[in-house]
Amino acid sequence: MILLAFRPFLDPLPLWNLPPALRMPLLLIPLTIGVAIVYKSIKCSSMKKVPRESAELTGWILLFMIVAAVALTALVRGLES
Amino acid sequence: MADTKTINAPWPIVAIAGWLLPGSGYWLLGQRSRALATGITVIAIYLAGLLVGGVRVIEVPGYDEFGQHVNVRVAGGGPTWILQVAPLQEIKAKPWSIAQILAGPLGIVSGYASVASADVAKVSHTPVNEAGTLYTAVAGMLNLLAIIDAAHRAGQPAPSEQPEAA
């Protein structure tokens, strides 16, 4: 029912049905892919290298974000206990 | 792919073209695959931000959440539009608008649409609003990177005259 009332670009995307812990991580994945494509398009001497290198960069960014999230969660829980 | 071919073009023209249409700076240099990759991605990220947060994620300096002028009272006068009195202060209060405008006329058009649709469009809230603002601002910053790189390439000799990059 909510989707029927959704007006693209006028209303925010109805993401509140998703679990709160999933919203930001899911939204960050497309942004990470976009950042990696543009960065590698600028950086690579040949555009043939861009698909592979941007896929690798996307993986590294996501990996480090997960590591940072785990480390910060552990730090906060350690400080709270 | 014609991504290493370089056509000479004045760097200011390349920079302005890159702002007017993301990726077109590279297109002027003959690097069409690079132009398409950067241009399509920047525009897609910007539009994704508008789709996620709604067009009201674009907060235009000088306008409030109802699409009305932000007025301030100056000494010895009536209410005056804040952009006429303290434009830098207002822009500093909405720093993401600087990044959003770097996406080119798309930023201006969406800013106009944001103000014009203030009475019909819904304002999103955290974290959807943050994500929409982040997407649009990152798109603008990536376009700035592309503009700088294209302008830099415009000022360089053709790749055949350069030593091979590592």
Image (cartoon, coloured by chain):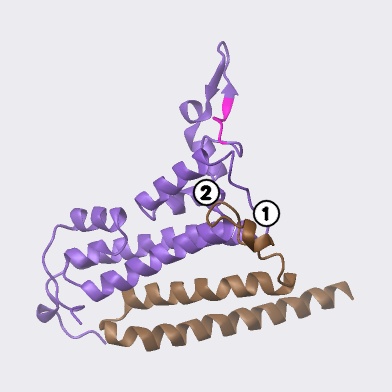
Chain colours: A brown, B purple
The amino acid type of the residue labelled 2 equals: Ile
- The chain identifier of the residue carrying mark 2 reads B
Q: Which residue type carries mark 1?
A: His
Name the residue nearer the viewer: B55 or B8: B55
Cα separation between marks 2 and 1: 13 Å
Residue B68 within the segment the image draws in magenta: yes
Give the image quarter of residue B162.
Answer: bottom left
| Range of residues picked out in magenta | B67-71
Q: Which residue is mark 2?
A: B58
Query: Are discs 2 and 1 located on one and the same chain?
Result: yes
Relative to A17, B102 lies left or right: left
Residue B95 belongs to magenta span: no
What number is the disc on residue B46?
A: none
Residue at image point 42% right, 66% down: B44
Residue at x 69% of width, y 74% of height: A22
Horizontal relation, residue A78 to residue A72: left or right? right
Magenta stretch: dominant secondary structure: loop
Please state the horizontal and vertical placement of residue B73, each as a whole percent of the image. 59, 20
The crowd level at tag 2 (other Cα within 10 Å; few <14, some 14-19, many 20+) is many
The residue located at (37%, 61%) in the rendering is B143
Q: Please report whichever mark, 2 or 1, sits nearer to the chain's N-terminal start.
A: 2
